[in-house]
Image (tube, rainbow, N blue to C red):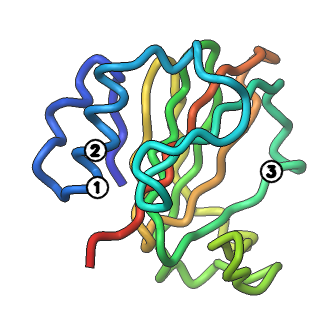
Amino acid sequence: MIVGKLKDIAHYKGLSKNIDTAIDFVLNNDLLALPKGKTEIDGNNVYVNRDTYVARPLEECYFEGHNNYLDMQIVLKGKEGFGYTHISDPGLVQTTPYNDAKDVTKYQNKALNEIYVTLEEGFALVFPEDIHLAKLDVDGQTVEKAVIKIKLDK
């Protein structure tokens, strides 16, 4: 997982073609001006989901993982907590089996040894081994967010 401030995102160019496409889109577009919902960037290879919501208490959040896409979760306004643990964490318990159509498996972490960071005008780039929890309330703020789905380059 890579966590950083949005102003530093260009440092991560060169990791893959699809990540570069996503970063170029971030650098050259006003993400706040995007309509809510899905906007294609490069067909199904790279697209963005734009959302606005009030972050939730921990008991209403869940951990998730993806097999075919990376997530670039970008908090544009407001702030939220973001949890992380590795797929090998022995405390992970699958709560919802893998859904191929949505590319997601949901988990609960029984060991409670995850790491939390606060995303504020920042991003988290999560890979398939990065089981993550988003939308966690920090102080009741409304969050403006873009999640760029980046197909794994194979």
Image position of 100 (left or right of 30): right
Q: Which residue is mark 2?
A: 21
Residues marked 3 and 1 touching at CB (< 8 Å): no
The residue located at (36%, 55%) in the rendering is 1
Residue sitting nearer the eye, 154 or 92: 154
Tell which tag, 3 or 1, sits nearer the viewer.
Answer: 1
| Residue 94, percent from left and from top | 74, 83
For residue 141, which quarter of the picture? top right
Q: Which mark is residue 18?
A: 1
Above or below, 7 relative to 46: above
Q: Residues within 10 Å of mark 1 (few under 14, many from 20)?
A: many
CA–CA distance in space, label 3 to label 2: 30 Å
Disc 3 or 1, which lies upstream in sequence?
1
Above or below, 76 relative to 84: above
Image position of 73 (left or right of 64): left
For residue 72, which quarter of the picture? top left
Q: Which mark is residue 61?
A: 3
Q: Residue furthest front?
A: 43
CA–CA distance in space, label 3 to label 1: 28 Å
The residue located at (58%, 57%) in the rendering is 132
Q: Residues within 10 Å of mark 3 (few under 14, many from 20)?
A: some
Quadrant (top left, top right, bottom left, bottom right) of the C terminus: bottom left
Q: Residues within 10 Å of mark 2 (few under 14, many from 20)?
A: some
